[in-house]
Image: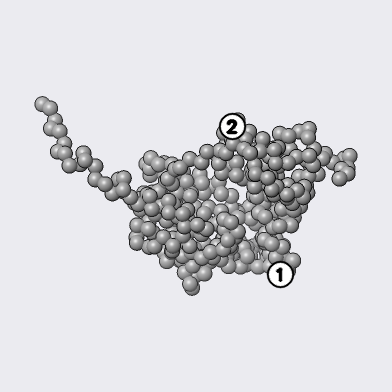
Amino acid sequence: MKISGTIPPTQDFLDRLRAVIRRKHYSIRTEQAYVDWVRRFLAFQAPLPPERLAEPEISAFLTHLAVREKVAASTQNQALNALVFFFRNVLQKSLDAPFQLVRAKRPLRLPTVLSKEEVHRVLRGLSGEHLLMAQLLYGSGLRLMEVLRLRVKDVDFDQHMILVHDGKGFKDRVTMLPDQLIAPLQAHLEIVRQMHAADLGRGLGSVYLPYALERKYPGAALDWKWQYVFPSDRLSADPRTGIVGRHHIDESGLQKEVRRAARAAGIQKPVGCHTFRHSFATHLLEGGYDIRTVQELLGHKDVKTTMIYTHILHRGGMCVRSPLDGVPPPKAQS
């Protein structure tokens, strides 16, 4: 392929990668991650041109990540996915041979789970929309980005349920809307509606639509039902289209508030937004719900992923009573 002299060859391949990703309607975060991994890979293999790269070069790069940079297994897998996508969709090369690489170790850790009392202590330290989002994380078992990407149309107050579109693995699912969140969420949406009306009055009010729906449904980007439930307090330009609108709020604000509330509650566990989802699953199993139901609510593809929460249910080591508890405590020496 002939490359223009005014465009660096690597940049040309990255631009082609972006074009394919957008044509396949991948999220902006996936685009950013894939482009970054391919950029690092091409720099690692320089000065070899991309057309001469194949499985051995991929294996060498992934081994470098595991051995030298000591990345986590999930990070190495993300890099592998990005490179496979690049080779198949941009370089038009099939990758049939097995990769000979050093795999990053995947630590077998149980998720951090809060007790119900600890959950409420953390929630008491939050307020406003941060409290409402945290309650959805725990009360509906949503992931952080699933909460942030909720659209008005996804909340069904009559059926007391939330529709999660394009969750992890591009899967849709249904989960419950807690009764006690209906009134606060309706009040919150009324404020959002007023803000949206003000945006429309200024000739703005557009929102990002997935899968080129703006072409299929002209004007839908201005429609109330497509607006984010938790919009940003400031307008911004879409990095792909340049259209000024109101995106969802940034996740860092809620992450910081949850960590602050956990510290203020005196909880000596590593608490993050995903801890609420772990606690949601564990507390449902504690309440007697069957694991298949919990699997569907969480959106797990394999029940084995959900099974990890059953290990947390076994209080005190498989419910075995310690032999020390059958021995009278020693008397204090005078």
Q: Which residue is mark 1?
A: 217
- Going 17% across and 42% down the picture, which residue do you hit? 326
Q: Quadrant of residue 241?
A: bottom right
Can see residue 187?
A: no
Marks 1, 2: nearer the viewer: 2
| Image coords of residue 245 (percent x, y) | 68, 57
User: Which label is found at residue 67?
Assistant: 2
The kind of secondary structure element at disc 2 is: helix
Q: Residues within 10 Å of mark 2 (few under 14, many from 20)?
A: few
- Going 79% across and 42% down the picture, which residue do you hit? 51
Name the residue at the left extreme: 334
Foreground pick, 78 / 166? 78
Q: Quadrant of residue 265?
A: top left
- Going 43% across and 51% down the picture, which residue do you hit? 308
| Image coords of residue 181 (percent x, y) | 45, 63
- Going 62% across and 38% down the picture, which residue do you hit? 101
| Image coords of residue 307 (percent x, y) | 43, 54
- 67 relative position to 129: left or right: right
